[in-house]
Image: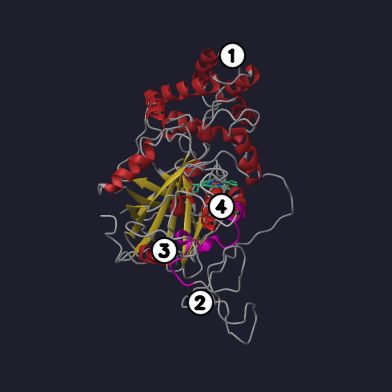
């Protein structure tokens, strides 16, 4: 089962020479010397001290002493699997991305699911956002779609990300609570950074306690760009839709499972793949014409807003199947390095200020997490297409670059960039027109923090609403500061007065005095938008 696809999966073929199986083999040192005894260190006399000469002892112990690498600064706990992506129909009209042209082509993928807050050893069923990161090993280089299972985000500008994470991680003086948002600093951040309102509604909903990784959606969150071979650009948002549908636990189940089987989600994924019940997700896109950029009553570059699917429909364009478990969790799941900046021709960025900051952060953190600039040579990170450039040396360099030329321009090696022609395919950034004065000011179009939070609440069924009230009561109820608890209900009255009032009663603070805001499901501005009407498959 495990090796079923090896013949046709180019990534699997690439990994094969790196696999080492010790079964039935004689032990050696790392230098290849056969070992005669692996249990007793070399001593001066049977009861004497260990001597420096014992190179086998020193090699074994020093390797062990250096086994750990830093866990990810966020999304530390995760689990991953290999698979394939197949396209339903060519996307040539919208993007020149090679892996989105031919429905007969299979693209190898590696997907890592994760929680955001908890450390490497935390439990799977914590109330948290789930990461859903996909690496497509395309012929034009690695394309990473680094998404979450919730379509919006906590903040609008990347410069606030360190603050958000400092607030949500365990408090620094006592490193509590682990993997939970039920504490003072998190809710203090919420009440004082109100762009978070929409995300918190999702976070308090059943979406934050999924039943299985096989049953979560994935969202690229930001607006990206598709660019076709004529240079025409459209805004695009990416969605993964699980074929099994979206299913959640209830909170009591999540808590009991956290105690009885902290590995619940990874076990579920692993076992499904082992028995051949392969998890499947359809890739969906929402597209907008550039001329519709300002037709909405929110900013399409604001990561705290989604594009309503009834106005900008999701078109399903392909399917991903996860069909092989990893051979080694450290080598693959831990060492994989996703980066939203890993794109291919035909996919480009927008000016979303959250996305712009992410483009810096991932490579920066991976330089320290994976020990220097050569982590793209780690087997799981290697593209399946050739690599040629003038980068050299650094810790643990694997490539043996031959020749004497490691600079550009030159006349001795004639190694030049590709042109941007379709034949050569050199990546060219979309030539968006930008203008303005340098400023730290925020666009007024990013100011509306509560409309979509209220729409989300209105879209919930009565049991789902009750679950949200219970979640607020549990999580905010754990906050020691009465002032913070009061600030939270005073904030969420804007989403729904009855909800905030019930929570206030449950957590022992005054009922909020403010009023909820009123919104309609679709504003005139929204329905006038001339969105890209792509045929549904
Ligand atoms: C992981 C930064 C927003 C999804 C990470 C990591 C960093 C980071 C430093 C660890 C990477 C590593 O060690 O390999 C940021 C910053 C953000 C941001 C600065 C905002 C300014 C987001 C958003 C999403 C997201 C909006 C979802 C759309 C993920 C996922 C991972 C991750 C899925 C785990 C990848 C894996 O499985 O290895 N992020 N992040 N992040 N981030 Fe973000």
Question: Does 115 appear above or below 80?
Answer: above
- Taking the spot 45% from the left edge, 70% from the top edge, the residue there is 385
Which residue position holds label 3?
18
Are the two marked residues, 3 and 2, in contact with CB atoms closer than 8 angstroms? no
Q: Nearer the viewer, mark 2 or mark 1?
A: 1
Q: Nearer the viewer, mark 1 or mark 3?
A: 3
Which one is in front in this view, the residue at disc 3 or the one at disc 4?
4
Dot 1, how many residues are within 10 Å of its Cα: few (below 14), some (14-19), or many (20+)? some
- Tell me the magenta residue range: 362-386
Residue in the foreground of this view, choosing between 82 and 89: 82
Q: Residues within 10 Å of mark 2 (few under 14, many from 20)?
A: few
Q: Which residue is mark 1?
A: 509
Measured as percent of width and height from the top left, residue 299 is found at: 57, 45
Q: Which residue is mark 2?
A: 421
Mark 1 and mark 3 in contact? Answer it, CB < 8 Å.
no
Q: CA distance from mark 3 to mark 2?
A: 36 Å
Colour scheme in use: secondary structure
Q: Looking at the image, is mark 3 or mark 2 earlier in the sequence?
A: 3
How crowded pointer 3 is (Cα within 10 Å; few <14, some 14-19, many 20+) is rated as: few
Mark with earlier residue (1, 3): 3
Residue furthest front as drawn:
45
Numbered circle sitting on residue 62: 4
Counting from the top left corner in percent of width and height, residue 422 is at 47, 75
Does any portion of residue 508 appear in the rendered image?
yes
The N terminus is located in which quarter? bottom left
The answer to which of 116 and 100 lies nearer the viewer is 116
* Count of numbered tags: 4
Query: In the rendered view of the protein, which quadrant contains the C terminus?
Result: bottom left
């Amino acid at each position: 089962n495990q090796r079923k696809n090896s013949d046709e999966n180019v990534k699997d073929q690439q990994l094969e020479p790196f696999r080492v199986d010790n079964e039935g083999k004689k032990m050696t040192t790392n230098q290849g010397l056969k070992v005669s005894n692996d249990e007793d260190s070399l001593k001066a006399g049977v009861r004497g001290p260990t001597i420096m000469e014992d190179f086998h002892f020193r090699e074994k112990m020093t390797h062990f002493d250096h086994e750990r690498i830093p866990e990810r600064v966020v999304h530390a706990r995760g689990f991953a699997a290999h698979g394939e992506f197949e396209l339903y129909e060519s996307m040539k009209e919208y993007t020149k991305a090679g892996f989105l042209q031919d429905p007969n082509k299979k693209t190898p993928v590696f997907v890592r699911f994760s929680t955001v807050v908890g450390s490497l050893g935390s439990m799977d069923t914590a109330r948290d956002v789930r990461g859903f990161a996909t690496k497509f090993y395309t012929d034009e280089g690695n394309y990473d779609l680094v998404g979450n299972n919730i379509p919006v985000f906590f903040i609008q500008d990347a410069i606030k990300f360190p603050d958000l994470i400092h607030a949500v991680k365990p408090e620094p003086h006592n490193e509590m609570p682990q993997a939970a948002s039920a504490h003072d600093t998190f809710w203090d951040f919420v009440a004082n950074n109100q762009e978070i309102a929409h995300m918190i509604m999702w976070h308090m909903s059943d979406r934050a306690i999924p039943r299985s990784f096989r049953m979560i959606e994935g969202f690229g969150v930001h607006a990206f760009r598709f660019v076709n071979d004529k240079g025409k650009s459209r805004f695009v948002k990416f969605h993964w839709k699980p074929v099994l549908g979206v299913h959640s636990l209830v909170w009591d189940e999540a808590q009991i499972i956290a105690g009885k089987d902290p590995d619940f989600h990874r076990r579920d994924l692993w076992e499904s793949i082992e028995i051949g019940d392969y998890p499947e997700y359809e890739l969906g896109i929402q597209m907008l014409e550039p001329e519709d950029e300002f037709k909405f009553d929110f900013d399409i570059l604001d990561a705290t807003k989604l594009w309503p699917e009834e106005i900008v429909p999701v078109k399903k364009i392909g399917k991903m199947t996860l069909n092989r478990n990893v051979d080694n969790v450290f080598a693959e799941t831990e060492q994989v390095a996703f980066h939203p900046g890993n794109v291919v021709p035909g996919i480009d960025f927008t000016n979303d200020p959250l996305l712009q900051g992410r483009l810096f952060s991932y490579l920066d953190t991976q330089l320290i997490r994976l020990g220097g600039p050569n982590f793209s040579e780690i087997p799981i990170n290697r593209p399946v297409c050739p690599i040629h450039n003038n980068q050299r040396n650094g810790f643990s360099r694997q490539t043996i670059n031959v020749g004497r030329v490691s600079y550009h321009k030159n006349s001795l090696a004639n190694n030049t960039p590709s042109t941007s022609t379709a034949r050569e395919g050199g990546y060219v950034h979309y030539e968006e027109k930008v203008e303005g004065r340098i400023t730290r000011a925020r666009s007024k179009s990013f100011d509306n923090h509560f409309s979509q939070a209220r729409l989300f609440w209105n879209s919930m069924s009565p049991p789902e609403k009750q679950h949200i009230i219970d979640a607020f009561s549990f999580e905010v109820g754990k906050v020691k500061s009465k002032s913070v608890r009061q600030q939270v209900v005073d904030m969420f009255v804007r989403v729904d007065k009855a909800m905030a009032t019930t929570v206030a009663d449950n957590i022992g603070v005054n009922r909020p005095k403010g009023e909820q805001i009123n919104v309609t499901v679709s504003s005139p501005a929204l329905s006038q938008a001339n969105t890209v009407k792509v045929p549904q498959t």
